[in-house]
Image (cartoon, coloured by chain):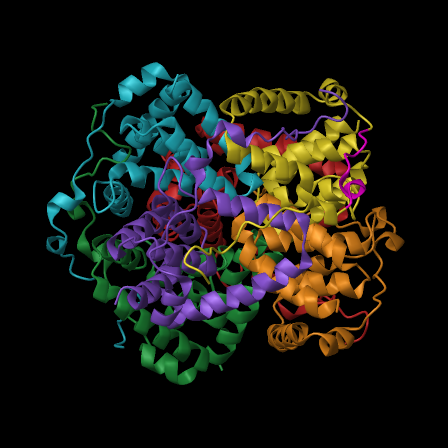
Chain colours: A orange, B yellow, C purple, D cyan, E green, F red
């Protein structure tokens, strides 16, 4: 416990211990453009996110970029399939009640070929864990699912 | 919109539309006793939960029983495997920061044969979505994982 | 602790122990239509909720229906009057900061004959427990109360 | 909108507009000592709170005292009975998942003569709104109720 | 522990112990009007807040006024500069994910002369503590910062 | 919007744009050992954290290390002093109600020479934003402050 020790001492990052093939980019069945063409809700979300992200990118903030990078890494193909992790992101988003995050992960899951029944069952976990306060977000999620899977 | 309408009109529940085989009990590889023998943290949690649940059961509260019942249903084998849904319960518990719930789902996942790497990757989703405020819970989760998977 | 035991073993539901008269539908003084005619905020909320709920109903998801059903049951006349429980729903909604839920319970309470002073005093509990982060939601709640009670 | 305006301009506080009789101290049927003698959980909570509050009082922090004062005011007899507002505090505490706060309001409600059935029904609202993440806190609440109402 | 004791006994408020000069109003470099003229997002927020606050003020609710008053006091010049406390308000707002609160404190900080780099670094603390669920709010915060600091 | 685009495309990290001197390690006035010797609460927290972190380190999880690393970076000397950012971490921890996180940042702030008055004023922001649900955590924070600053 030296005077400069801190809770989370910055470790030398050693990506080597997890072979690269474990965290590779997933293969999307559908491009974002395809989704935007199919669903008006998705289109508005994707365009608004792109516009706002461009503004964040312009600021070129070091820590924000690090967080975006980690966030990107968390959903790559790994020990668990990217599909499963996008659905986990959906569960987390729904029980933390963030509409933008729900839209994002539901769209990503759709692009990876997840079925509507799988999306609904994931949302059910969030609904049961998070309670009726999740219902308004569930309604909006189902509105998106209706457009995506018709 | 009659005077007695409410937001969530009580629908006739029709379990028929989802054939029973879709929501069957999962097969556990390990009994709770096995887990309790292996991990002291698990043992204390399982015993305390059992003692407190016995007290809740005694009260025989209608709505509490309904919620327990639904909670039970959410993690059965379905369109998604029980394993995946227990890990989703773990993600929800970690990003909502509930140690008891984390212990519960990590133990259930272990009992279903989930690997430690799968548990860690699920916790990573919760950590990235939920931020560093999740770290104290992650530490305690890893303490349990260490005991379960040694 | 058998291999298939789970945290919340599905109990046989025995609604008999609570005689039916304890959980009967409340009597509303005002229909939703009356509220919608009086308040533009209420009208938009009621119509949007009805449209989105119709879409959820169409999906006919077993677990969602169960949660809606329980949610409906929680606010019936019981040991505590429906009025009190709608106000408790308002408190929970305000301290969890969900505008849709606040609108829903404030409207339900109004339909049951709750006074504005009672609504304000309930919101005060949420404000004090939940802190100044509740203020933006309080402002929108007061905007609705102004329309409902003029 | 002057340069010094702020969101919440400090208004002259006019307690006169709400006659004093509307916010009077409630009459407790039981002293804290009585509760502490009856329930070991209550005793430990009451003693620990008293010890820690004494330490906070010693600091004599202006804003902390103001917040304690407002918190005290929120549960006085008013348009709604103190009983109802303590139960609302219980609902808020349970859906925000704070054990200490649950203990506090359940004890206060008990001291005011609230029945166990009323406490359970209030907790049900929190359970349904807040979801299964509330269950660990519900278990501990029921443990206290068991000791208080035996 | 008398029958009427409560958790937070209302202390005699003694503002004297903290000399008045420690909690004086900060000096704003820019009026709200200046900010509203510079940023369309700020203008809409300021106008909407003013309109809704006028409606709250009209209700003249005793406890609401007390909470507004305390909220006002928390950000005055004190042991810490008002600038620092507005940025702390920004951090709290961002990790609790309240857009209105983020706008409010970012505007206040701007009015006090805080630089964009200081605002970004504060938001980084909230982003790291609160995780990727904060990202949608960060995007909207950066949209406001872009308008304020151009 | 290519088929493989994602919300947060992994940017090439360019630490160059923020010169290293802006994110340098802060100088601690006191070692953790000094703090542990002075305060029993601090000692227990520091030892427990060290033990659990050693277990997390052993797992060598890539993403966990990345999150720890970012968390470490967020509190370095930057545009804002490390002192201020540790206090912001304290505010975030208190309004998100995490005792371990409160202990961690209060200790770090103490080690950097922050006064007790500054710690209290920071906690006040969290108390006002987060409401009375923060009080149990405030009490425990004051217990630690009492030991640190005696």
Residue at the (63%, 38%) spot, across then down? B71
**Which is more toward the observer, A70 or E96?**
E96
Give the tally of numbered discs: 0
Does the segment drawn in magenta span residue F94?
A: no
Q: For the stretch drawn in magenta, what is the main secondary structure?
A: loop
Res. B139 in view: no
Is residue B1 placed above or below B133 in the rendered structure?
Answer: below
Horizontal placement of F103 versus F18: left or right?
left
D4 left or right, relative to E47: left
The quadrant in which the C terminus of chain B is found is top right
- A51 horizontally vs E143: left or right: right
Identified at 36% across, 74% down, the residue is E48
- Residue occupying the point 41% across, 60% down: C103
E93 versus D123 height, above or below = below
Of all residues, the one furthest to the top in this rendering is D37
Camera-side residue of F110 and A109: A109
Left or right of residue A13, residue D26 in this image = left
Numbered range of the magenta stretch: B19-28
Q: Is residue A147 above or below residue D138?
A: below
Does D15 sit above or below residue B103?
Answer: below
* Residue C42 location (% of width, % of height): 40, 67
User: Which residue is depicted at the point 35% across and 34% down?
Assistant: D105
* Horizontal and vertical percent position of residue D112: 27, 29
Q: Nearer the viewer, residue F137 or C149?
A: C149
* Residue C37 visible, this angle: yes
Q: Where residue D132 sits: x, y (%)?
A: 57, 39
| Image position, residue F4 (x, y; %) | 81, 69
């Amino acid at each position: 416990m030296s005077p400069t020790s801190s809770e989370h001492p910055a470790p030398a990052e050693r990506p080597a211990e997890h072979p690269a093939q474990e965290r590779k980019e997933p293969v999307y069945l559908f491009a974002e453009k395809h989704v935007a063409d199919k669903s008006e809700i998705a289109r508005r979300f994707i365009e608004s996110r792109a516009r706002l992200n461009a503004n964040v990118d312009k600021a070129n903030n070091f820590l924000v970029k690090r967080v975006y990078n980690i966030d990107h890494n968390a959903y790559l193909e790994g020990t668990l399939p990217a599909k499963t992790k996008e659905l986990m992101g959906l569960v987390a988003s729904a029980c933390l009640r963030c509409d933008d995050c729900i839209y994002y992960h539901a769209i990503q899951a759709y692009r990876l070929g997840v079925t509507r029944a799988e999306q609904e069952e994931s949302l059910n976990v969030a609904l049961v864990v998070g309670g009726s306060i999740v219902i308004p977000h569930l309604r909006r999620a189902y509105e998106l699912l209706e457009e995506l899977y018709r």
